[in-house]
Image (spheres, helix red, strand yellow):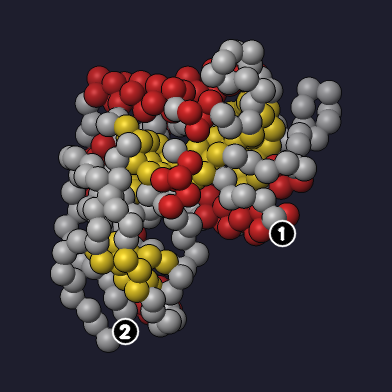
Protein backbone atom coordinates (compact mmCIF):
# COMPACT_ATOMS: atom_id res chain seq x y z
CA UNK A 1 0.00 0.00 0.00
CA UNK A 2 1.38 3.44 -0.96
CA UNK A 3 0.97 6.26 1.54
CA UNK A 4 1.67 10.00 1.38
CA UNK A 5 4.67 12.03 2.60
CA UNK A 6 4.18 14.66 5.29
CA UNK A 7 3.55 18.04 3.77
CA UNK A 8 2.11 21.43 4.53
CA UNK A 9 -1.58 21.87 3.83
CA UNK A 10 -3.30 25.17 3.22
CA UNK A 11 -7.06 25.26 3.54
CA UNK A 12 -8.86 27.57 1.10
CA UNK A 13 -12.49 28.01 2.16
CA UNK A 14 -13.60 24.43 2.82
CA UNK A 15 -11.01 22.72 0.62
CA UNK A 16 -7.48 21.52 1.28
CA UNK A 17 -4.38 22.38 -0.72
CA UNK A 18 -1.47 20.02 -0.26
CA UNK A 19 1.86 21.74 -0.85
CA UNK A 20 5.35 20.30 -0.90
CA UNK A 21 7.25 23.37 -2.13
CA UNK A 22 7.12 27.11 -1.26
CA UNK A 23 4.29 29.10 -2.79
CA UNK A 24 3.69 32.77 -3.51
CA UNK A 25 0.89 34.24 -1.45
CA UNK A 26 -1.22 37.26 -2.28
CA UNK A 27 -3.38 39.21 0.13
CA UNK A 28 -6.63 38.00 -1.47
CA UNK A 29 -6.13 34.30 -2.18
CA UNK A 30 -3.70 31.52 -1.48
CA UNK A 31 -3.06 29.64 -4.70
CA UNK A 32 0.04 27.64 -5.59
CA UNK A 33 1.25 28.33 -9.12
CA UNK A 34 3.24 25.23 -10.01
CA UNK A 35 4.17 23.79 -13.40
CA UNK A 36 1.90 20.97 -14.54
CA UNK A 37 3.55 17.65 -15.22
CA UNK A 38 2.64 14.02 -14.63
CA UNK A 39 3.97 12.32 -11.52
CA UNK A 40 6.15 9.41 -12.54
CA UNK A 41 6.43 7.80 -9.11
CA UNK A 42 4.06 7.66 -6.17
CA UNK A 43 5.78 8.18 -2.84
CA UNK A 44 4.67 6.89 0.59
CA UNK A 45 2.56 9.09 2.81
CA UNK A 46 2.07 10.00 6.43
CA UNK A 47 -0.67 12.00 8.10
CA UNK A 48 -0.83 15.57 6.69
CA UNK A 49 -0.81 18.73 8.77
CA UNK A 50 -3.87 20.95 8.26
CA UNK A 51 -4.02 24.74 8.52
CA UNK A 52 -7.40 26.48 8.55
CA UNK A 53 -8.41 29.59 6.64
CA UNK A 54 -11.68 31.47 6.98
CA UNK A 55 -11.19 33.67 3.90
CA UNK A 56 -14.27 33.52 1.69
CA UNK A 57 -14.04 33.59 -2.07
CA UNK A 58 -14.95 36.73 -3.99
CA UNK A 59 -16.27 36.41 -7.51
CA UNK A 60 -12.96 37.69 -8.83
CA UNK A 61 -11.09 34.97 -6.97
CA UNK A 62 -13.49 32.29 -8.23
CA UNK A 63 -13.10 33.55 -11.80
CA UNK A 64 -9.34 33.22 -11.40
CA UNK A 65 -9.72 29.63 -10.17
CA UNK A 66 -12.05 28.73 -13.05
CA UNK A 67 -9.50 30.17 -15.50
CA UNK A 68 -6.76 28.07 -13.92
CA UNK A 69 -8.99 25.00 -14.22
CA UNK A 70 -9.48 25.61 -17.95
CA UNK A 71 -5.72 25.81 -18.43
CA UNK A 72 -5.16 22.53 -16.56
CA UNK A 73 -7.94 20.80 -18.51
CA UNK A 74 -6.44 21.87 -21.82
CA UNK A 75 -2.99 20.61 -20.83
CA UNK A 76 -4.22 17.22 -19.60
CA UNK A 77 -6.47 16.68 -22.64
CA UNK A 78 -3.42 17.15 -24.88
CA UNK A 79 -1.44 14.63 -22.81
CA UNK A 80 -4.25 12.06 -22.98
CA UNK A 81 -4.67 12.55 -26.71
CA UNK A 82 -0.95 11.94 -27.18
CA UNK A 83 -0.95 8.65 -25.23
CA UNK A 84 0.25 5.65 -27.22
CA UNK A 85 -2.76 3.34 -27.85
CA UNK A 86 -0.84 0.26 -26.72
CA UNK A 87 0.15 2.00 -23.46
CA UNK A 88 -3.45 3.01 -22.91
CA UNK A 89 -4.58 -0.62 -23.26
CA UNK A 90 -1.88 -1.78 -20.83
CA UNK A 91 -2.89 0.82 -18.26
CA UNK A 92 -6.61 0.02 -18.70
CA UNK A 93 -5.91 -3.64 -17.98
CA UNK A 94 -3.64 -2.90 -15.00
CA UNK A 95 -6.13 -0.49 -13.38
CA UNK A 96 -9.17 -2.73 -13.85
CA UNK A 97 -7.33 -5.83 -12.62
CA UNK A 98 -6.23 -3.92 -9.52
CA UNK A 99 -9.85 -2.97 -8.78
CA UNK A 100 -11.22 -6.48 -9.39
CA UNK A 101 -8.61 -8.08 -7.14
CA UNK A 102 -8.88 -5.54 -4.30
CA UNK A 103 -10.47 -6.67 -1.01
CA UNK A 104 -12.41 -3.40 -0.72
CA UNK A 105 -14.00 -4.09 -4.11
CA UNK A 106 -14.71 -7.75 -3.44
CA UNK A 107 -16.36 -6.95 -0.12
CA UNK A 108 -18.59 -4.12 -1.35
CA UNK A 109 -22.24 -4.96 -1.96
CA UNK A 110 -23.60 -1.74 -3.42
CA UNK A 111 -21.63 0.58 -5.68
CA UNK A 112 -21.91 3.41 -8.17
CA UNK A 113 -19.59 3.31 -11.18
CA UNK A 114 -19.15 5.35 -14.33
CA UNK A 115 -19.49 3.92 -17.82
CA UNK A 116 -16.28 4.77 -19.66
CA UNK A 117 -16.37 6.71 -22.91
CA UNK A 118 -13.55 6.17 -25.40
CA UNK A 119 -14.01 9.58 -27.03
CA UNK A 120 -13.43 11.25 -23.64
CA UNK A 121 -10.23 9.21 -23.07
CA UNK A 122 -11.54 7.87 -19.76
CA UNK A 123 -10.02 4.85 -18.04
CA UNK A 124 -11.92 1.81 -19.30
CA UNK A 125 -14.46 0.29 -16.90
CA UNK A 126 -16.02 -2.27 -19.27
CA UNK A 127 -14.27 -5.23 -17.64
CA UNK A 128 -15.35 -4.15 -14.15
CA UNK A 129 -18.97 -3.67 -15.21
CA UNK A 130 -19.04 -6.95 -17.13
CA UNK A 131 -17.69 -8.87 -14.15
CA UNK A 132 -20.43 -7.42 -11.95
CA UNK A 133 -23.31 -7.91 -14.38
CA UNK A 134 -22.36 -11.09 -16.23
CA UNK A 135 -20.86 -13.10 -13.37
CA UNK A 136 -22.97 -12.28 -10.31
CA UNK A 137 -22.25 -15.63 -8.65
CA UNK A 138 -18.45 -15.44 -8.76
CA UNK A 139 -16.42 -14.86 -5.61
CA UNK A 140 -15.29 -11.49 -6.96
CA UNK A 141 -18.71 -9.96 -7.50
CA UNK A 142 -21.14 -11.87 -5.28
CA UNK A 143 -24.42 -10.05 -4.63
CA UNK A 144 -23.31 -6.65 -5.90
CA UNK A 145 -25.89 -4.02 -6.77
CA UNK A 146 -24.74 -1.57 -9.43
CA UNK A 147 -25.88 2.00 -10.11
CA UNK A 148 -24.65 3.99 -13.13
CA UNK A 149 -25.02 7.64 -14.20
CA UNK A 150 -27.95 9.11 -16.08
CA UNK A 151 -27.66 12.80 -16.98
CA UNK A 152 -30.96 14.47 -16.18
CA UNK A 153 -30.43 17.92 -17.72
CA UNK A 154 -27.79 20.52 -18.63
CA UNK A 155 -27.83 22.10 -15.16
CA UNK A 156 -25.37 19.70 -13.50
CA UNK A 157 -28.15 17.33 -12.39
CA UNK A 158 -27.32 13.64 -12.60
CA UNK A 159 -28.91 10.52 -11.15
CA UNK A 160 -27.47 7.08 -10.45
CA UNK A 161 -29.85 4.35 -11.60
CA UNK A 162 -29.76 0.61 -10.92
CA UNK A 163 -29.02 -1.75 -13.81
CA UNK A 164 -28.87 -5.55 -13.93
CA UNK A 165 -27.60 -6.18 -17.47
CA UNK A 166 -25.40 -4.47 -20.03
CA UNK A 167 -28.46 -4.47 -22.31
CA UNK A 168 -30.01 -1.91 -19.94
CA UNK A 169 -27.68 0.70 -21.43
CA UNK A 170 -28.49 2.85 -24.47
CA UNK A 171 -26.48 5.55 -26.26
CA UNK A 172 -27.55 9.12 -25.54
CA UNK A 173 -27.32 12.11 -27.89
CA UNK A 174 -23.56 12.34 -27.24
CA UNK A 175 -23.12 8.60 -27.96
CA UNK A 176 -22.37 7.90 -24.30
CA UNK A 177 -23.95 4.80 -22.82
CA UNK A 178 -26.39 5.33 -19.97
CA UNK A 179 -29.45 3.58 -18.54
CA UNK A 180 -32.91 4.37 -19.81
CA UNK A 181 -34.98 5.87 -16.95
CA UNK A 182 -37.48 3.00 -17.30
CA UNK A 183 -36.80 -0.69 -17.90
CA UNK A 184 -38.18 -2.93 -20.66
CA UNK A 185 -41.36 -3.52 -18.63
CA UNK A 186 -41.98 0.21 -18.26
CA UNK A 187 -40.98 0.32 -14.59
CA UNK A 188 -38.90 3.20 -13.28
CA UNK A 189 -35.37 2.18 -12.38
CA UNK A 190 -34.34 2.44 -8.75
CA UNK A 191 -32.58 5.72 -7.99
CA UNK A 192 -29.72 5.43 -5.52
CA UNK A 193 -31.04 8.52 -3.74
CA UNK A 194 -34.19 6.55 -2.89
CA UNK A 195 -32.37 3.35 -1.92
CA UNK A 196 -32.91 1.98 1.58
CA UNK A 197 -29.31 0.85 2.02
CA UNK A 198 -26.05 2.81 1.77
CA UNK A 199 -23.54 2.70 -1.07
CA UNK A 200 -20.18 1.17 -0.18
CA UNK A 201 -18.12 2.42 -3.11
CA UNK A 202 -18.04 5.08 -5.82
CA UNK A 203 -15.81 4.44 -8.84
CA UNK A 204 -15.24 7.89 -10.30
CA UNK A 205 -13.89 9.37 -13.53
CA UNK A 206 -12.05 12.67 -13.86
CA UNK A 207 -9.67 14.60 -16.02
CA UNK A 208 -6.87 15.18 -13.49
CA UNK A 209 -5.98 14.23 -9.92
CA UNK A 210 -3.30 14.74 -7.30
CA UNK A 211 -2.19 12.71 -4.30
CA UNK A 212 -3.94 15.04 -1.86
CA UNK A 213 -7.36 13.96 -3.14
CA UNK A 214 -8.16 16.80 -5.48
CA UNK A 215 -10.12 15.84 -8.57
CA UNK A 216 -10.61 17.98 -11.67
CA UNK A 217 -13.66 17.08 -13.75
CA UNK A 218 -14.59 18.19 -17.24
CA UNK A 219 -16.34 21.37 -16.18
CA UNK A 220 -19.99 20.32 -16.01
CA UNK A 221 -20.12 19.94 -12.25
CA UNK A 222 -22.27 16.80 -12.46
CA UNK A 223 -20.23 14.58 -10.16
CA UNK A 224 -19.46 17.22 -7.54
CA UNK A 225 -23.15 18.17 -7.39
CA UNK A 226 -24.27 14.55 -7.10
CA UNK A 227 -21.61 13.56 -4.56
CA UNK A 228 -22.51 16.46 -2.27
CA UNK A 229 -26.18 15.43 -2.45
CA UNK A 230 -25.32 11.83 -1.61
CA UNK A 231 -23.08 12.91 1.28
CA UNK A 232 -25.98 14.94 2.69
CA UNK A 233 -28.27 11.90 2.40
CA UNK A 234 -25.73 9.63 4.09
CA UNK A 235 -25.41 12.13 6.94
CA UNK A 236 -29.19 12.37 7.26
CA UNK A 237 -29.47 8.56 7.41
CA UNK A 238 -26.46 8.23 9.70
CA UNK A 239 -24.72 6.00 7.13
CA UNK A 240 -21.01 5.55 6.78
CA UNK A 241 -19.69 7.53 3.82
CA UNK A 242 -18.76 5.40 0.81
CA UNK A 243 -15.20 5.13 -0.42
CA UNK A 244 -14.69 7.54 -3.33
CA UNK A 245 -12.13 5.95 -5.61
CA UNK A 246 -11.01 7.52 -8.90
CA UNK A 247 -9.33 5.69 -11.80
CA UNK A 248 -6.41 7.49 -13.43
CA UNK A 249 -3.94 7.06 -16.27
CA UNK A 250 -0.39 8.13 -15.49
CA UNK A 251 -0.57 11.48 -17.37
CA UNK A 252 -3.62 12.48 -15.31
CA UNK A 253 -1.72 12.47 -12.00
CA UNK A 254 -0.36 15.97 -11.42
CA UNK A 255 2.02 17.55 -8.95
CA UNK A 256 0.51 18.74 -5.70
CA UNK A 257 -0.70 22.32 -6.11
CA UNK A 258 -1.44 22.03 -9.83
CA UNK A 259 -5.20 21.54 -9.43
CA UNK A 260 -7.16 24.58 -8.22
CA UNK A 261 -10.28 23.92 -6.15
CA UNK A 262 -13.36 25.75 -4.91
CA UNK A 263 -15.46 25.04 -1.79
CA UNK A 264 -17.89 23.08 -4.00
CA UNK A 265 -15.30 20.53 -5.15
CA UNK A 266 -15.47 17.10 -3.51
CA UNK A 267 -12.22 15.37 -2.59
CA UNK A 268 -11.62 11.72 -3.41
CA UNK A 269 -10.48 9.10 -0.91
CA UNK A 270 -8.12 7.14 -3.14
CA UNK A 271 -6.68 6.73 -6.62
CA UNK A 272 -6.20 3.56 -8.63
CA UNK A 273 -3.31 4.04 -11.05
CA UNK A 274 -1.37 1.67 -13.33
CA UNK A 275 1.09 1.30 -10.44
CA UNK A 276 -1.52 0.35 -7.86
CA UNK A 277 -3.77 1.85 -5.19
CA UNK A 278 -2.98 5.21 -3.58
CA UNK A 279 -5.06 5.69 -0.39
CA UNK A 280 -5.35 9.36 0.50
CA UNK A 281 -7.98 10.06 3.16
CA UNK A 282 -7.92 8.56 6.68
CA UNK A 283 -10.94 6.38 5.85
CA UNK A 284 -9.16 5.02 2.77
CA UNK A 285 -6.05 4.23 4.79
CA UNK A 286 -8.24 2.42 7.29
CA UNK A 287 -10.45 0.52 4.84
CA UNK A 288 -8.15 -0.28 1.90
Residue 245 placed where, x, y %?
A: 46, 41
| Residue bearing the label numbered 1 | 236
Image quadrant occupied by the C terminus:
top left
| Tag 2 secondary structure | loop
Q: Is residue 124 left or right of residue 155?
A: left
Above or below residue 163? Residue 6 is: below
Residue 28 is marked as 2
Q: Which of the two discs, 1 and 2, labels the residue nearer the N terminus?
A: 2
- In this view, the residue in front, 33 or 270, is 270
Q: Residue at x 24, y 61 (%)?
A: 7
Q: Are marks 1 and 2 in contact (CB under 8 Å)?
A: no
Image quadrant occupied by the N terminus:
top left
Residue 175 placed where, x, y %?
A: 53, 31
| Tag 1 secondary structure | helix
Above or below residue 74? Residue 105 is: above
Residue 138 is marked as none
Mark 1 or 2, which is nearer the eye? 1
Picture quadrant of residue 271: top left
Amino acid sequence: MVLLTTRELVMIGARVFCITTPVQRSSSIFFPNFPIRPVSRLSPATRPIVAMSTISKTQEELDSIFKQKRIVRSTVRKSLKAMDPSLRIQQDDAIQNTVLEAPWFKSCRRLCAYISCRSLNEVDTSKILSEILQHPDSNTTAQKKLYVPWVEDKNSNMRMLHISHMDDLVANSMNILEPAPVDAQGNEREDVMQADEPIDLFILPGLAFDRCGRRLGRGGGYYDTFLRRYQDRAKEKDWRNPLMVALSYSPQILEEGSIPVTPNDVLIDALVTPSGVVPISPCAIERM
